[in-house]
Image (cartoon, grey):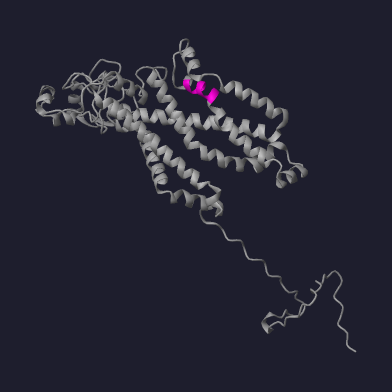
């Protein structure tokens, strides 16, 4: 009776499953003598294109599905990016000058007037003599709006605040146009949105004011959110006396009137961008604490968190790797609305006179001028339209972000 040869030592033979039937191999699949059969490797996992997980791809699809919100986000982002180059859009200095075979960049460098035959420390490029000197010995490339936010225009067709140039007649523009060698309104620099009560161009101040408002809001929202997330994470994760002490402190701290504090501080320190930012940061971080605290309280007793503790992971690593991603969903949902509130706060302080220093480009200061000059409706209407459009775009974008992170739509 023939018996099968036993396998060589050191060879592991897999036991067949009960009820399994042997599968015959094709001739081309049979291993050669002395060659061990190769085990096929499992198929590779598919790679998600774009570096996004399936969950984030569904969130992005939900964000794009909200057409009003996604377009509002794109428009707001585009306007903000343009405002970052405000010096190239609205400025009383040329962008580029070619003078006597020399290239100059006045928008970036302060050239003394002696370079153009004058004697002042800083060149006034709006001076007729300087313009004539540059035109005779080269050329200059000017921004589309030849006024900066602080440019004083002493040659206005009408008393300040002057209405937009397109609202004036040629008869009103003729005295100023004749000084420049023309006869109509087309021969003078235009103020598309008029001037304020100190002869400054409203459109230029709107562009610079929009930039400083958004930058203030972004910095305030980002830093306050980071502090609020950290405080809420500590409260929710540790709980107990830590949570109780933090809650009592936040109740007291949140009850301090911020406006009165700013008024008191402004009596000792001249209010500025960073002074206002520091004061607002002292109180604005409270907004996110309750949201993040609730997320950490809910998730700290989940099975995967207990397993992480059993494996010996530190509290910081558990909070950062396992709990923070879940809490960031609520944080990102609230971010556009926090930005909206930050911009509104700066506008309100400027309107009341406790914001940025006098002369700074500010939308709130433009609204205050509209209130004080009811005979110049373009001031109030311009400020209202810009602020309303900016805040509306942020609200619509925030609703799109909320839809993107809505679990009912993400996991449907």
Dividing the picture into quarters, in which one does residue 187 lie?
A: top left
Would you place residue 169 above or below residue 15 in this image? above
Residue lying at 68% horizontally and 80% vertically, measured from the top left: 29
Q: Main secondary structure of the magenta part?
A: helix
Check the image and report above or below for 143 versus 4.
above
Numbered range of the magenta stretch: 276-283
Q: Which residue extends farthest right? A: 1
Residue 191 highlighted magenta (yes or no): no
Q: Nearer the viewer, residue 374 or 340?
A: 374
The image position of residue 174, as x and y in percent, is 10, 25
Q: Residue furthest bottom?
A: 1
Q: In x, y percent, where is residue 167?
A: 17, 30
Instruction: Please report the residue visible at 86 percent of the width from the left and 82 percent of the height from the top.
Output: 4
Residue at 50% in and 47% down: 404
Query: In this picture, is 59 found above or below 96?
Result: below
Task: Give left or right: position of 362 versus 23.
Answer: left
State the quadrant of the C terminus: bottom right
Q: Does residue 106 appear in the picture of this structure? A: no
Horizontal placement of 78 versus 94: left or right? right
Q: Position of residue 190 (x, y in %)?
A: 20, 29
Residue 345 location, quadrant: top left
When asked about the image quadrant of residue 297, the answer is top right
Does residue 280 appear left or right of residue 295 in this picture?
left
- Looking at the picture, tell me which residue is in the foreground, 279 or 52: 279
Q: Is residue 19 visible?
A: yes
Residue 294 as seen in the image, left or right of residue 363: right
The x and y percentages for residue 338 are 49, 33
């Amino acid at each position: 009776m023939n018996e099968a040869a036993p396998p060589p030592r050191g060879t592991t033979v897999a036991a067949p499953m009960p009820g399994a039937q042997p599968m015959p191999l094709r001739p081309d699949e049979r291993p050669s003598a002395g060659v061990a059969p190769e085990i096929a490797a499992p198929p590779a996992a598919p790679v998600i294109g774009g570096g996004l997980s399936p969950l984030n791809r569904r969130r992005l699809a939900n964000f794009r599905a909200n057409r009003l919100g996604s377009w509002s986000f794109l428009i707001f982002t585009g306007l903000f990016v343009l405002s970052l180059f405000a010096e190239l859009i609205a400025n009383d200095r040329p962008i580029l000058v070619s003078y006597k075979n020399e290239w100059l960049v006045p928008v970036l460098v302060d050239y003394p007037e002696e370079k153009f035959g004058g004697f002042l420390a800083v060149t006034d490029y709006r001076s007729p003599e300087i313009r004539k000197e540059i035109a005779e010995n080269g050329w200059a490339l000017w921004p589309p709006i030849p006024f900066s936010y602080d440019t004083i225009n002493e040659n206005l067709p009408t008393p300040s605040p002057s209405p937009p140039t397109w609202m004036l007649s040629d008869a009103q523009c003729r005295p100023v146009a004749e000084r420049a060698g023309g006869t109509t309104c087309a021969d003078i620099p235009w103020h598309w949105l008029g001037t304020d009560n100190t002869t400054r161009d409203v459109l230029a101040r709107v562009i610079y004011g929009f930039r400083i408002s958004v930058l203030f809001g972004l910095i305030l929202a980002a830093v306050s959110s980071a502090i609020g997330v950290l405080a809420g994470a500590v409260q929710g994760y540790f709980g107990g006396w830590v949570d109780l002490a933090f809650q009592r402190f936040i109740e007291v701290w949140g009850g301090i009137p911020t406006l009165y504090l700013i008024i008191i501080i402004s009596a000792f320190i001249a209010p500025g961008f960073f002074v206002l930012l520091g004061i607002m940061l002292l109180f604005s971080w409270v907004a996110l604490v309750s949201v993040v605290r609730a997320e950490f309280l809910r998730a700290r007793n989940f099975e995967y968190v207990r397993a992480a503790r059993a494996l010996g992971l530190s509290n910081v690593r558990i909070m950062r790797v396992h709990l923070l991603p879940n809490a960031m969903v609520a944080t990102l949902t609230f971010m556009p609305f926090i930005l909206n509130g930050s911009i509104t706060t700066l506008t309100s302080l400027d309107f009341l006179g406790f914001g940025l220093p006098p002369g700074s480009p500010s939308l709130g200061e433009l609204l205050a001028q509209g209130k004080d000059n009811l005979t110049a409706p373009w001031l109030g209407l311009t400020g209202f339209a810009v602020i309303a459009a900016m805040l509306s775009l942020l609200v619509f974008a925030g609703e799109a972000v909320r839809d993107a992170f809505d679990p009912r739509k993400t996991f449907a």
